[in-house]
Image: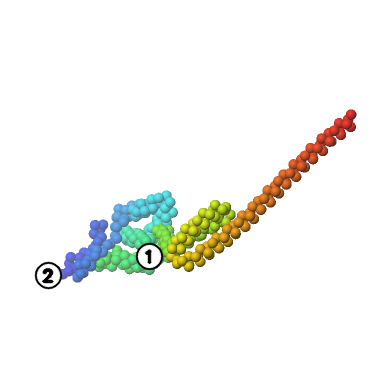
Amino acid sequence: TFRTKNQNRHVGSMPDKKSTEGTVPSKNPAKNTPVKFLIWEHLSRTDVSTLFHISSRDDQGKLLASKLGINDKYANSDDELRRKALVELFMNVLRFCHKRSMNAEKLSTLMSIVLVTHEKMTESPLPSMRECFDGFKAMLLRHSVERPPFSIAVFHPADVKAIVHHMIEIMFRNHKLYQFVHGQTMELEISDEKKEEATKGNTEEQGVDSKKDEEEEIIAVGGEDELGEASSEEVGEDDEFKKELNEEEKEEFDALSKEFTGLIQRHYEQKLQLLQNSFEDRVAKLVANRQTASGETASEETASEETKELDKSTTE
């Protein structure tokens, strides 16, 4: 007896939760990748039956949020608005399924397709709308054609057309909005290390220059002791430089050093003399003002005494 290949295939049978994966045969063993079907993946038959018998929208939203993992994903109080936005998306899908009179298999599969698409849409880095729609279309076609183990027929062609049109209106037109609300926030910091090092070097040079200027100001208004210390340091540097000169150059260098030292001394002596004269003038003015003030006080006291004597004589 001979058996055909199609005698072992159960056409039209729906896989349950335990058989939602098949293997695509290929001549290359490395390409035998499992094809995952999403029927009963997130919502079981019992969950869908319970969902059909609930009349309150709030209770339906709570059941969907619990079974689809929305409550676990947005458990913090700060994420309440994000949780409500995602629950509203699946409530919209539920109303669409009721309007189309879809059975439990179709509702469970469509909910899982929308959930996987949303996760793909908001992953990091954020994909484009074309990439998200291509993934959604591939999953939908995988559940619309009876061709095991490549695909299974959960949806009819009319269902596929209606689902694509509805998801474009409620989800893919708001692609950027869902990414903004549910996407992960990433901050990119760019710094130029060479520029920072150059800025740091310039700051250090400015600090050194300002320090040198302060030292020069201190020397300029200082006394003979500070000038002598600065001169001794310069002499030490000159001795090191003179070692590299011959006799004639040394004599010429000594003469120039003496002349330069004399000019510096005369310059600071003149400056010190000016400062001393200015100080003496200010002291003289201060003494004169004190004397003038004391003289006026004395004259006022004398006048008051004379006035008292005049009043006394007049009374007598």
On screen, residue 150 above or below 268: below
- Of residues 4 and 74, which is closer to you in this image? 74
| Rendered location of residue 40, percent (x, y) | 29, 57
- Of residues 207 and 11, which is closer to you in this image? 207
- Of residues 276 and 133, which is closer to you in this image? 276
The answer to whether one can see residue 281 in this image is yes
Label 1 sits on residue: 127
The quadrant of the picture occupied by the N terminus is: bottom left
Q: Is residue 163 left or right of residue 32?
A: right
User: How many tags in the picture?
Assistant: 2
Residue 4: image quadrant is bottom left
- Residue density around tag 1, few if under 14, some if 14–19, many if 20 or more, within 10 Å: some
Q: Secondary structure at mark 1?
A: loop
On screen, residue 72 above or below 179: above
Residue visible at 34% across and 60% down? Answer: 116
Residue visible at 42% across and 49% down? Answer: 77
Residue 220: image quadrant is bottom right
Q: How is this picture coloured? A: rainbow
Label 2 sits on residue: 2
| Rendered location of residue 112, percent (x, y) | 33, 59
| Rendered location of residue 219, percent (x, y) | 55, 55
Question: What is the three-letter code of the residue carrying label 2?
Answer: Phe
Q: Is residue 166 left or right of residue 210?
A: left
Q: CA distance from mark 1 to mark 2?
A: 51 Å
Q: Nearer the viewer, mark 1 or mark 2?
A: 1
Residue visible at 82% across and 35% down? Answer: 305
